[in-house]
Image (spheres, grey):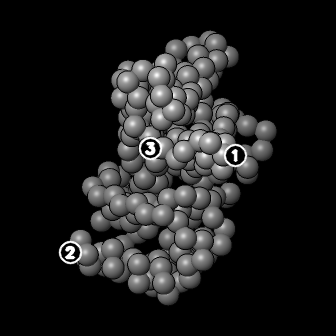
Amino acid sequence: MELAIDVGNTLTKFGLGEKGKVIYSFEFSTDGTKKKDELILLLRSFFLSHHLSLLEESYSILSSVVPSLTSEYVLALEEVTQRTPVVVGPGLKTGLSLKVDNPKEVGSDLIAVSIGALNYAPNSCFVADFGTASKYIYLDKEGRFAGLSIAPGMDISAKVLSEKGAALPSFSYEVPPSALGKNTFDCLKSGLLYGTIYEALGFYHAFEKISGTNLTPILTGGNAPYLASLLPEWRYEKDLLLEGLFTILERKYSL
């Protein structure tokens, strides 16, 4: 069994996998102040609470967009698994070709999500990743990462609305009865959820026009569950990023 960890700005996700497949995943809020010893306790508590072994001498892989936590997780994983983890970043051969101006700018999360998507759609793919930011990724007909667009995510938009609009209340992410709201809460929900959907559809059609080909749409990310019902024709993959990490690990060690 292998371990994959994705440290995002908002959420951190642990995944256990075998032969490149996710068999269990767990997510929690990211705390950028955590140190090695705290992370070791967190990892051990995670395994013990789920009646799992500590994965000694097992392979692990780390994707992190929080620099203050990257080195701490590396040290913690080394102690827990007795192996140095694979860290996704510049210099690591992942098998994904980056057709962009500066490949070093492409985040580890984008690489992992893209590789995960290519397991389902080997070419001509559109990935909508709804996390802290909404990321719209284009994978071309040769399976290369060929660009993306980044927009403020749902949480950021909702927070700004409540902070800047003195008369606007906080609200849940439930899908309203209609895109046309009839009360304050439904109006806010419509603007956020349907607004995000129309944004995603707009980029999807724009990327199809730019590429000149039909694209397979895939939906993922922490906020994707709120949107999946509004995009029934799109494939929803909850653990797409973790699947990408396990694919990278499998390729590196021929697991």
Residue in the foreground of this view, choosing between 164 and 94 = 164
Give me the C-alpha separation between circle 2 and circle 3: 34 Å
Indicate which disc, 3 or 1, sits on the residue closer to the N terminus: 1
Mark 2 = which residue? 51
The secondary structure type at the circle numbered 2 is loop
Residue 195 in the image, given as x and y percentages of width and height: 56, 27
Residue in the foreground of this view, choosing between 177 and 108 = 177
The secondary structure type at the circle numbered 1 is helix
Residue ID at (73%, 37%): 100
Which label sits on residue 164? 1
Give me the C-alpha separation between circle 3 and circle 1: 17 Å
Above/below status of 141 relative to 97: above
**Viewer-side label of 2, 1:** 1
Residue in the foreground of this view, choosing between 165 and 201 = 165
Residue 157 in the image, given as x and y percentages of width and height: 62, 42
Residue ID at (49%, 19%): 180
Which label sits on residue 172? 3
Residue 52 placement, left or right of 255: left
Above/below status of 13 relative to 191: below
Identified by mark 2, the residue type is His
**Viewer-side label of 2, 3:** 3
Evaluate if marks 3 and 1 touch, with contact meaning CB atoms under 8 Å apart: no
